[in-house]
Amino acid sequence: MLAEKQIPFQAVWVDIEQGDNLQPSYLALNPKAEVPVLVHEVDGEKRVITQSTVICEYLEDCFSDRPLFPLEPAERALARSWALRVDMGIHVPHTAAITFTIGMREPLLAMLDTPEKKAAYLEAIKDPVNLEVRVQMLEQGFESPYFYQALKAFDELFQIMQAQLEQTRWLAGDSFSYADIVIAPYIKRCLLLDLQNMLAPYAKILPWYESLTRRESWQTEIAAKDAGFVARFRAASEGAWQRVEPLLTR
């Protein structure tokens, strides 16, 4: 959203896999240990804004010369409904569940090779929902009820996206908007985690995503900068579909 609005900014990478988000300096910004965090300095005052939806709305309010929220009230409400869907479960616990199970569980188990290390890692997680998800992911992996629920939640999201994209070019109408920005990371995450076959029944989603990834903002701020992240996740998720497919037929 920063790039779409052409707002100059400095990005600081927070490596969740290495526990950067659990360090005291980061927890001072966001006690829930979630990313992202926006630090906006105005007249010498540092404003700390957390939660992706709140950050996006804050940026829209502060930098309104390049609006990304639809102007038409019904489309604006629709855009907000996509963000609400993310906040009501797609991000946590569902994306957390599939990400930790497929992309991070094995490296974490290798890193947390003593009871003391595991206890210290879990003690640093202050949000109770995140804590419960990670405990289950570490202990049960693909067999965790959280993982199965996450797969079902994503399939429901894909159904709703397909229905909307059969009516409009973008998720909140025929113009690119905030709605597309808030949903795109979750499609990207599914593709990184070897879940692309889940999209097969939904013919409109990949063309929508490909149109989005051709935008200059995506090319300069995401595609050009996260190659290492993409490579790690793809390596970790190789063969995941063989474990996931049987769960979808339950």
Image (cartoon, rainbow, N blue to C red):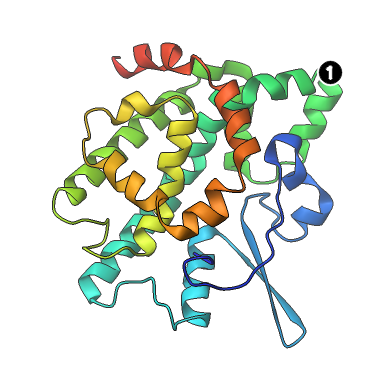
Q: Can you give x and y, in whole percent of width and height, for residue 86 in the image? A: 42, 50
Q: Residue 55's spot in the image, x, y percent?
A: 54, 66
Q: Amino acid at mark 1?
A: Thr
> Which of the pair 65/69 is nearer the observer?
65
Would you identify the image quadrant in which residue 230 lies? top right
Task: Tell me the residue that label 1 is attached to.
Answer: 114
> What quarter of the picture does the C terminus occupy?
top left
Q: Residues within 10 Å of mark 1 (few under 14, many from 20)?
A: few
* Depth order, front residue of 132/109: 109
Q: Secondary structure at mark 1?
A: loop
Horizontal side of 117 relative to 68 (left or right) equals right
| Residue 101 makes an appearance in the image | no
Position of 50 with respect to 111 (left or right) is left
Whole-percent x and y of residue 181?
Answer: 42, 57
Q: Residue at x 54, y 67 (%)?
A: 2
- Residue closest to the eye, 131 or 155: 155
Residue furthest out toward the left: 167
Residue 166 location, x and y as percent?
A: 15, 48
